[in-house]
Amino acid sequence: MLQLEDLVLAQGDFRLQADLAVPGGGRVAVLGPSGGGKSTLLAAIAGFIAPQRGRILWQGRDLAPLAPGARPVSMLFQDGNLFPHLTIERNLVLALDPRGRLTPERRARIEAALARVGLAGFGPRRPSALSGGQQSRAALARALLSERDLVLLDEPFAALGPGLRAEMLDLVTEVLGAAGRTILMVTHAPDDALRLGDLALVVDEGRAAAPTGVEALLRDPPPGLRNYLGH
Ligand SMILES: Nc1ncnc2c1ncn2[C@@H]1O[C@H](COP(=O)(O)OP(=O)(O)OP(=O)(O)O)[C@@H](O)[C@H]1O
């Protein structure tokens, strides 16, 4: 379980409060208007922003003393998930060894992860030789390899067309969901929220609300979300 206990985050004049829990293995869409604080929330969980107050706990353990790299968190952004000068294989080995040393055993694990996301044989290529969708798949393979319990996705597929986005979300559910990962994904698209899983949380007016059922939330959205969704 991920617990945000009496949390207050600050970015300049902006303040965000959260007091909520996400069940282990949950797949949660993070919804809310632009500038509401969705990225701020994820950045704090990943350890890029220190809370002003409160605690972030994973399985009862306070994450405060842990630097971002030591947290049980892997993060996917819209861009910049892969180092452009490294092959896919070299990018992926970083999930297994921070110094990037390839061994036959690591090579085999990388190839298996690539096959899992439909990229068998792509290891020797550089990211620039992959399409946008393939790059997203490679980033997912890295998250799978890293074996970190919490996966935070900040609009990772926003640049992809609707068909490809749906495919990637199914892959997230199939590959990371099946591995028991707890997933928080920022999205602006209600369809994506429904596709990801059964929970959603709203970040609006300085507060991150507790996760609730995504279908009920979208059927009867709170006022801030209603305006944002154009209801
Ligand atoms: N480094 C910073 N310094 C000062 N203010 C910041 C900083 N980063 C973000 N903010 C402010 O914090 C607020 C929340 O931003 P955040 O990026 O978390 O929102 P968001 O919900 O992810 O928005 P979007 O959907 O547009 O990506 C905004 O008002 C933003 O201007």
Image (cartoon, rainbow, N blue to C red):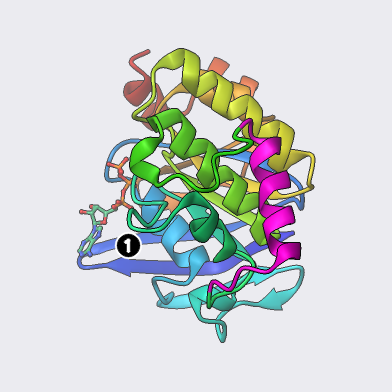
**Label 1 packing within 10 angstroms: few (<14), some (14-19), many (20+):** some
- The residue segment tinted magenta is 100-118
Q: Position of residue 132 (x, y in %)?
A: 38, 31
* Secondary structure, magenta segment, majority class: helix
Residue depicted at 74% across the width and 59% down the height: 1
Give the residue displayed 61% in from the left and 40% down from the top: 28
List the residue tagged with mark 1: 15
Q: Is residue 111 magenta?
A: yes
- Residue situated in front as seen by the camera: 125 or 117: 125
Q: Is residue 112 above or below residue 190?
A: below
- Residue 220 seen in the figure: no
| Quarter location, residue 195 | top right
- Where 37 falls versus 68 (above or below)? above
Please indicate, yes or no, whether residue 71 appears anywhere in the rendered image: yes
**Relative side of 78 to 174, left or right:** left
View extreme (left): residue: 13
Quarter of the picture holding the C terminus: top left
